[in-house]
Image (cartoon, grey):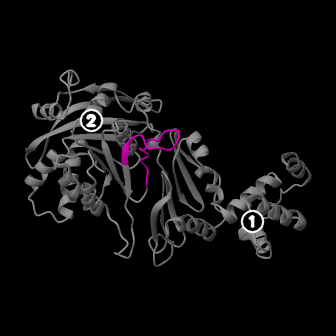
């Protein structure tokens, strides 16, 4: 069959001046006259597309071979057009794709090696809208004037967000962002080889999550917070005596369940995800899941991100003696505590600022601040311990820091250093939960 297709490619030239959109519309009209298209498999559908091209003598601007044009048309009509291949695990893993975003006529891609602009575009704004609605239909949403914003989990580890008119202008069309999270592929080796962590700092955080010192990982979008959180949870998920529960916002990214060759679970984990709905009966917010999760008696609770009122609930939960780890958007390690306080106040807390700061510090004594630097590399810039409240702000003890020395030849030069040791209170907490004095040496 491949040899036959190769001969067709050599025999029939599809190069021409006809715009792709015009070719697509012609083929779409042709396919409406074909019976039982919904029941066709991929090969049958593509065969009809090829027949239309060859019998009608269709030519296309920018096309190279008949099979490539057939594949593009098939993806436009039944898949996700030019995004199709990029959204397959084999391709996005090999290319290290982290984000694809833009609008119909301007598309960017962020990879582990940096940002690029694609030469490919959608043939029109309306065609792009149809493709985007094909994606959002997977999580029961449609982009239109009445509901211009659609957010959800497109596939495991893939978040898809869209914004249309009237939020965006008619000329710009729908803005989209598809984020691919590689957290489940995160390992200690990757975190160290990439320079994100110094080995001793990573050792310290592994001790904290294992022995009851709660952690909040702060940083901007794309800084690698989720990957770090996934790795830390995975270090304790190997212990079948520990019960781990995770709550994620809108999409499921953590894959902590371990199975043997027969599909039997080897560890004790469960994963929940929120659900957004305009109908309050079907809306499942994070704070509701945080309130419910205690009934399932987890030893460690992971909240994918503190965004809104769930900050108050998860801070309360972290004060009950359960292990907890979460992420947060904040501009620095120290600012993370202010952000937690602000979210708690937004949720309606009646405590004054001093009380909220002290509660936030007790709930999350360890703050990790992570950032994607100018050269595209992710670094943990600081790890601090919250030790008190003074001068209307959190008082923190710096433990580890990445010292930037220079920027040259497109690289950020620097080194990880240890800047302090933990407090007696934190040392006692770790000992109380099973850490040995030997494990705490050097911290």
Q: CA distance from mark 1 to mark 2?
A: 52 Å
Name the quadrant containing residue 215: top left
Q: Which mark is residue 319?
A: none
In the rendered view, would you say 185 is above or below 247? above
State the SS at label 2.
Answer: helix
Q: Is residue 256 magenta?
A: yes
Residue range in magenta is 252-269
Q: Residue at x 75, y 69 (%)?
A: 22
> Depth check: 241 or 334 in front?
241
Q: Residue at x 39, y 75 (%)?
A: 278
Q: Which mark is residue 40?
A: 1
- Residue 172 visible in the shown view: no
Instruction: Report the quarter where the C terminus lies.
Output: top left
Query: Within 10 Å of the Cα at label 2, are there few (<14), some (14-19), or many (20+) other Cα atoms?
Result: many
* Residue identifier under label 2: 210
Q: Residue furthest right?
A: 11
> Depth check: 368 or 413 in front?
368
- Residue 227 visible in the shown view: yes
């Amino acid at each position: 069959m491949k040899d036959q297709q190769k001969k067709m490619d050599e025999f029939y030239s599809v190069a021409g001046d006809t715009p792709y959109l015009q070719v697509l519309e012609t083929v779409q009209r042709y396919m409406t006259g074909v019976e039982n298209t919904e029941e066709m498999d991929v090969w049958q559908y593509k065969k009809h597309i090829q027949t239309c091209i060859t019998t009608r003598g269709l030519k296309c601007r920018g096309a190279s071979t008949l099979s490539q044009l057939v594949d593009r048309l098939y993806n436009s009509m039944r898949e996700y057009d030019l995004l199709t291949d990029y959204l397959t695990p084999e391709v996005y893993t090999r290319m290290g794709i982290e984000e694809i975003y833009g609008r119909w006529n301007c598309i960017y891609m962020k990879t582990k090696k940096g940002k690029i602009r694609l030469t490919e575009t959608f043939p029109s704004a309306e065609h792009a809208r149809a493709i985007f609605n094909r994606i959002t239909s997977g999580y029961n949403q449609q982009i239109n004037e009445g509901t211009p914003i659609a957010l959800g989990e497109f596939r495991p580890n893939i978040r898809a967000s869209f914004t249309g008119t009237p939020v965006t202008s008619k000329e710009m069309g729908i803005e989209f962002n598809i984020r691919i999270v590689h957290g489940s592929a995160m390992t200690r080796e990757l975190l160290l080889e990439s320079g994100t962590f110094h080995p001793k700092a990573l050792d310290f955080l592994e001790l904290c999550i294992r022995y009851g010192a709660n952690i909040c990982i702060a940083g901007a979008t794309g800084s690698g917070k989720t990957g770090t959180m996934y790795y830390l949870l995975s270090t304790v998920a190997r212990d079948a005596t520990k019960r781990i529960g995770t709550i994620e916002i809108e999409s499921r990214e953590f894959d902590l369940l371990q199975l043997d060759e027969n599909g039997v679970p080897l560890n004790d984990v469960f994963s929940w995800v929120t659900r957004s709905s305009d109908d309050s009966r079907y809306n499942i917010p994070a704070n509701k899941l945080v309130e419910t999760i205690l009934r399932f008696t987890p030893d460690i609770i992971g909240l994918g991100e503190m965004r809104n009122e769930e900050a108050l609930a998860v801070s309360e939960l972290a004060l009950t003696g359960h292990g907890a780890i979460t992420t947060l958007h904040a501009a620095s390690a120290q600012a993370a505590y202010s952000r937690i306080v602000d979210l708690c106040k937004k949720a309606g807390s009646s405590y004054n600022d001093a009380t909220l700061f002290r509660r936030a510090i007790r709930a999350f004594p360890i703050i990790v601040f992570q950032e994607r630097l100018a050269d595209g590399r992710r670094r943990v810039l600081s790890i601090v311990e919250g030790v008190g409240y003074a001068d209307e702000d959190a008082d923190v003890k710096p433990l580890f820091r990445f010292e930037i020395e220079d920027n040259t030849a497109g690289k950020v030069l620097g080194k990880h250093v240890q800047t302090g040791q933990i407090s007696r209170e934190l040392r006692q907490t770790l000992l109380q939960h099973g850490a040995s004095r030997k494990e705490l040496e050097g911290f």
